[in-house]
Each structure stands twice: as C-alpha cells, then as structure tokens.
Image (spheres, grey):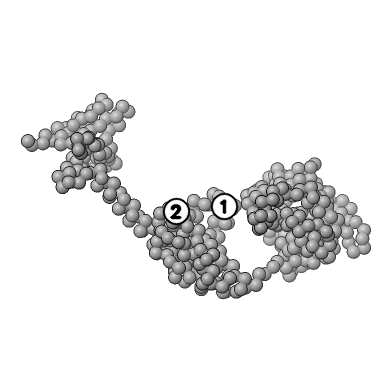
C-alpha cells in the first residue's frame, strides 16, 4: 500500500495555532506545543514501541533558522531511507554526534587547550598580570614547538624540545614553563582531549631526564641591607617628608612585601586595635594575613591619614592608584643602588636569628611564610598573633635606636607635608 504523504500545505503549517500533532504522512509530523511553538518530528516504531526523532523547529522560509515544510520532508525521507537500510535514525544521529565529538577532540591543539585553560582560570588568579605572564611565557617558549599540534600528540620528546632550549640558560623561566605546560595537559586530560600520563610532570619523570634547577643555577637572594645598618637608614627616612619615605618606613616596620604595603587600604586597618588584615587575594600565599601594628607603625599611619585618597593608605599621583613600585625604588636606590626593598625582609629575618631568642616559627609566621612541613603545619593552626606583636615591637625598637642608643621615632622628627 502506497504511503500517504504531503498532506500538509505551507499555508496550513503557517496558520495552525492549535496545540497538537499534525501528520504530513509517512511518519512526518508538525508538533504545535501549548506555547504555540512549532517543530518537526519523525515518528516511527521499533519492536512495537514508538520512537520520536526531533528534526528541528519550524521555519516559514529559508532566511530563518529551522526547517521549512520542504526541508522537513527531505529530512523525514532521509530517516525513512535509514530505516529501509536497517538503521535506527535516533541511533544514527547519536553515532554521528559521537564521531563529531571525536573529530573535535582530535582537532584540539595545545594552543586551543592553553587558551581555554587560561580563560577558565583567569577570574581565580590574583591579578590580570598573572594571566598575562601565563600567555606570554607559553607564547614565547611553548607555542613555537607544540602550539599547533594536536594536544593528544604532545609527548615527552616534544616537552623536552620546549624545555631543553632554556633549561640551563633560564632555569627559573623554564621551571614555570614546565609547570604551565603540565597544568594545560592535565586540563586537557580531564576534559577528555588526551589520555595517559602527563609528559610534563616532574616527580618520577622529568626529574630523571633534566638536572634540578638548583644544580644548573644557584639561587640568587635579594641583596639586603645588613640588619645593623637598618636603624640608621630608618631614622634617615623619617626626615624625608614624602609619601614614598613613609611607605618605606612602614614596609621596614611591618616586614611585609612591598606590594602588600603599597596597596594597603584603610578598610583593612584598625588603628585603635593596632591590627592590619591583608586579604587573601593580595597575599602571595593566597591566605589572609594579620599584621600587628606597633606604636611606631600606627604613628606613621596617622601621619599619612590626612592625605588619604580613594581609601588608599599610600596614594599615588593618579586617581584610584596606590603609590607605584617605581616611586619607592627611586627613593631607595638613590642612596642604596645595589640593594633591594624586598631585602628588608631578609634584614628582619637575620636580626631575629642573630639578635633575639624568638623561635624560628615565630619569625617565619611574621613574614607570612608557608610552613612546608605538613606535620608541623597540621599542629600550627594559629597565627601566634600576640607573640608576633611582641616580636614586632622589639624590631621597631631596633629600627628606632641609632648607634648612640637614644630612641628616635617619627613623632620626634618630622611631620609629613602636602
């Protein structure tokens, strides 16, 4: 018996506004939903059970997305042809989608994966600069070798080609490149774009093929001012009535990193309690850090408070910007061109070890260093805040006491000018 087909007309399909099913014949139906949206469905039976294969939404003409009546009929005929050949149309569609997904996986290059990894992690990183560093190091050192290759084909030989060229000349950069390549490949594996072990992993793998970083280049420490010279420099700083001088004084007294002090906001500071809480997003460790403020540190903050702008403790020349690192470096380098501001943390640490009986873990906690020993970290859950306050008061006394032994502080010397 011949199939009854082409029962519908373009006008009827366009005008139909009653929810229901409307047969065109040979399994093709127009479905009008309760919301009056229209779509095409091919209905058929397998083993006595009905199956419904969605073909797509209705379109009045070829300029719109969807299927016109004629295109729907062609799609239904393709389904009938599949059934005549013993193939289920729904199973066929799923198989085609799986093949397309496989083709997409094969087409994912290392660069594609790196771009997606960076984009997915961008909001979780501390700053826009961190994302730029990822993009720049991979673009410079990894992409020329493996960027255009399928991510599934990146093996240990290719990773070594990326690293060996810079491992001895730029060990620090090479280490970061390896870590970033490893992260991208881990991401690709988790997303199903590759299988197997990560060829960029270090422990038990590349550590057998490449020398340790410590073997190819000695660690270069920041050049620090000897702790016995800090008081002379600190007292001299107090005679300079500039924002840069005050910021440097504050850095020395608190033992924090330069960026942590420069970007300090008044909302983080409780002058009355003598506490400064640096939020996790501004800390290298990714954890918030409480800093005990000595009387001298509080006095410095009180001196700069009248000049506060946009909630910043140490405002710069531009609106909504803190004082720049360059401004601090210029002030410091004019007198000490061979030393670094970061070195004051080493000065403090050396003073703790050489001149006090405070325990090592207290000094490390004052510097917000992460406890590397897992067992020690498990037991040391507090931040020893009150004990650190006493330590920082002792450090402040050291900074304020010149060789002659007469205590000097900011309140004895100067007042910051406009």
Q: Is residue 388 above or below residue 30?
A: below
In the rendered view, does 17 fall on the left or right side of 326?
left
Q: Determine which residue is flagged by label 1.
A: 125
**Viewer-side label of 2, 1:** 2
Based on the displayed image, in which of its 4 quarters is residue 24 positioned? top left
Q: Is residue 409 above or below residue 341?
A: above
Location of residue 177 in the rendering, given as x and y in whole percent from the top left corner: 53, 64
Give whichever of 311, 21 is nearer the camera: 21
Q: Which mark is residue 277?
A: none
Location of residue 203 in the rendering, given as x and y in whole percent from the top left corner: 54, 64
Give whichever of 182, 243 is nearer the camera: 182
Q: Quadrant of the N terminus?
A: top left
In the rendered view, does 410 fall on the left or right side of 205?
right
What is the crowding at mark 1: few (fewer than 14 residues within 10 Å), some, or many (at least 20)?
few
Q: Determine which residue is flagged by label 2.
A: 190
Location of residue 339 in the rendering, given as x and y in whole percent from the top left corner: 74, 67
What is the crowding at mark 2: few (fewer than 14 residues within 10 Å), some, or many (at least 20)?
few
> Sequence order check: which comes first, mark 2 or mark 1?
1
Q: What residue occupies the far left of the structure in this picture?
A: 1
Disc 2 and disc 1: Cα gap in Å? 20 Å
Location of residue 292 in the rendering, given as x and y in whole percent from the top left corner: 77, 49
* Residue at 68% over, 59% down: 325
């Amino acid at each position: 018996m011949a199939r009854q087909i082409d029962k519908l007309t373009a006008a009827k399909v366009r005008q139909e506004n009653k929810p229901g099913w409307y047969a065109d014949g040979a399994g093709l139906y127009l479905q009008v939903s309760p919301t009056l949206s229209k779509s095409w469905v091919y209905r058929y039976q397998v083993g006595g059970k009905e199956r419904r294969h969605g073909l797509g939404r209705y379109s009045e003409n070829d300029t719109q997305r969807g299927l016109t009546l004629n295109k729907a009929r062609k799609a239904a005929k393709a389904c009938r042809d599949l059934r005549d050949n013993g193939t289920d149309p729904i199973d066929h569609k799923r198989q085609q989608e799986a093949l397309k997904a496989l083709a997409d996986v094969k087409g994912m290059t290392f660069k594609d994966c790196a771009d997606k990894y960076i984009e997915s992690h961008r909001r979780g990183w501390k700053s826009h600069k961190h994302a730029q560093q990822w993009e720049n190091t991979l673009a410079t050192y990894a992409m020329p070798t493996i960027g255009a290759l399928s991510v599934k084909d990146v093996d240990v030989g290719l990773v070594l080609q990326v690293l060996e060229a810079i491992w001895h000349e730029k060990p620090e950069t090479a280490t970061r490149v390896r870590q970033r390549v490893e992260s991208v490949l881990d991401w690709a594996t988790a997303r199903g774009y590759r299988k197997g072990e990560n060829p960029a992993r270090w422990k038990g793998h590349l550590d057998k093929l490449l020398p340790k970083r410590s073997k190819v280049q000695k660690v270069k420490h920041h050049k620090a001012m000897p702790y016995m010279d800090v008081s002379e420099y600190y007292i001299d700083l107090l005679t300079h009535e500039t924002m840069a001088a005050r910021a440097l004084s504050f850095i020395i007294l608190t033992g924090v990193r330069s960026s942590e002090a420069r970007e300090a906001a008044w909302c983080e500071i409780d002058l009355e309690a003598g506490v400064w809480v640096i939020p996790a997003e501004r800390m290298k460790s990714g954890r918030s850090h409480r800093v005990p403020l000595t009387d001298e540190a509080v006095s410095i903050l009180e001196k700069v408070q009248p000049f506060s702008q946009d909630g910043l403790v140490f405002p710069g020349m531009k609106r909504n910007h803190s004082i720049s690192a360059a401004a601090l470096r210029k002030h410091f380098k004019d007198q000490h061109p061979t030393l670094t501001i970061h070195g004051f943390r080493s000065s403090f640490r050396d003073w703790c070890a050489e001149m006090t009986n405070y325990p090592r873990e207290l000094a490390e906690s004052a510097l917000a260093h992460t406890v590397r020993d897992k067992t020690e970290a498990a037991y040391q859950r507090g931040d020893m805040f009150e004990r650190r306050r006493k330590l920082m008061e002792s450090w402040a006394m050291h900074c304020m006491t010149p060789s002659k032994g007469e205590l000097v502080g900011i309140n004895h010397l100067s007042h910051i000018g406009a």
